Amino acid sequence: MNNFTDTLNTRIPDAIAPTNGSNGHETTSMTVTVVIPARNEEPSIEPIITGSQLYADEILVVDGHSEDRTSEIALSHGARVVTDNGVGKGDAIRVGIEHASSDIIVFIDADGSHSPDDIPGMVQPIKDGDADLVVGSRMRGGSDELHGDFLKFFRMVGSDIITLGLNYRFGASLTDTQNGFRAIRTSAARALNLVEDITTIEQEMGIKALHAGFVVTEIPSHEYERAHGDSCIQLRTVWFRYVYTWLKYLLFGKRSALKPLAIDEETIRKTPALSS
Ligand SMILES: Nc1nc2c(ncn2[C@@H]2O[C@H](COP(=O)(O)OP(=O)(O)OP(=O)(O)O)[C@@H](O)[C@H]2O)c(=O)[nH]1
Ligand SMILES: [Mg+2]
């Protein structure tokens, strides 16, 4: 049995980060890839890249077949650029997880909603061995996108209901499980067998992580209004997929969350923290 499966078998499946927190890995030198999913974000992507570079070993932009200069700008600022399969943000997240070359992945949007300056605080619990997944909580940090009109209110209530379900199911006390701004140990992300093609991947990740016994925690993070243009997400047409995904993974997620035990040598080799 390798370190990873040892860790899973001994970890207490508690959503609150343990205080004694050693996950058995060498953590101080853990490297960070910042994954930026981006579709037509030409006006806002540059400061996200340059701001993230201060805290990252690698910047990986996952381009959603942008029709503007998003990928050109990313390349000119030293980011690696890969292209998704054109089916949604969930797919982009999966492509990012597949291509990231560091021990920790941070996901940050390209529209200016998140501050790269939150990245150090977000990765620290993972480096300390206190968490596997750290979500930026808009409920603790405040949000300009969850208040003000009916649609924003609907988003906030929906997000709260989803989080309440997770807390009830797993005995956790999280305040935001939906924010796309988050950090995860790369080996944990690869082990979760994520399949959602759209933004429902965020709740899938949270629920499967808790089912698998990974430690999920959060830090306060402010969410700003997107810097330009229109949302890529049409909530009116996808809300029922959130409800369906929530019920599906909360009730039956355990089966698919058992994938960590099937982690193979290739994944361990690709993930320095596991092979050391
Ligand atoms: N690669 C890729 N990126 C995407 C796709 N859909 C959305 N994104 C990016 O994912 C991030 C989040 O999308 P947003 O449209 O901002 O969604 P949101 O944050 O829920 O909504 P608003 O901020 O209110 O617009 C942004 O950086 C988008 O450019 C996609 O299909 N492929
Ligand atoms: Mg946004």
Image (tube, rainbow, N blue to C red):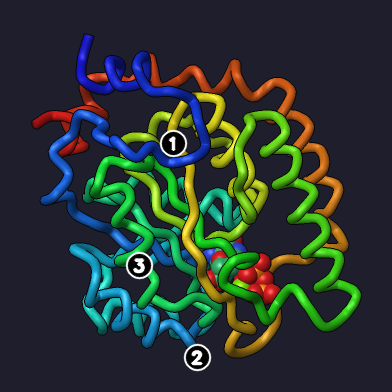
Residue 152: x and y in percent read 81, 73
Q: Mark 3–mark 1 contact, CB under 8 Å?
A: no
- State whether residue 16 appears in this view: yes
> Which is nearer the eye, 197 or 245?
245
Which image quarter: residue 113?
Answer: bottom right
Q: Quadrant of the N terminus?
A: top left
Instruction: Name which residue lies at 86% across and 47% down.
Output: 240
Q: Quadrant of the C terminus?
A: top left
- State whether residue 81 appears in this view: no
> Which is nearer the eye, 182 or 12?
12
Q: Residues within 10 Å of mark 1 (few under 14, many from 20)?
A: many
Q: Residues within 10 Å of mark 3 (few under 14, many from 20)?
A: many
Q: Amino acid at mark 2?
A: Pro
Please tell me whether residue 33 is drawn above or below residue 149 in the rendered image. Answer: above
Res 119 label? 3
Residue 85 relative to residue 129: left or right: right
Q: Secondary structure at mark 3?
A: helix
Residue 104: x and y in percent read 29, 50
The residue at which mark 2 appears reads as: 43
Residues under labels 3 and 1: Cα distance?
Answer: 18 Å
Res 243 label? none
Please tell me whether residue 264 is drawn above or below residue 55 in the rendered image. Answer: above
The residue at which mark 1 appears reads as: 215
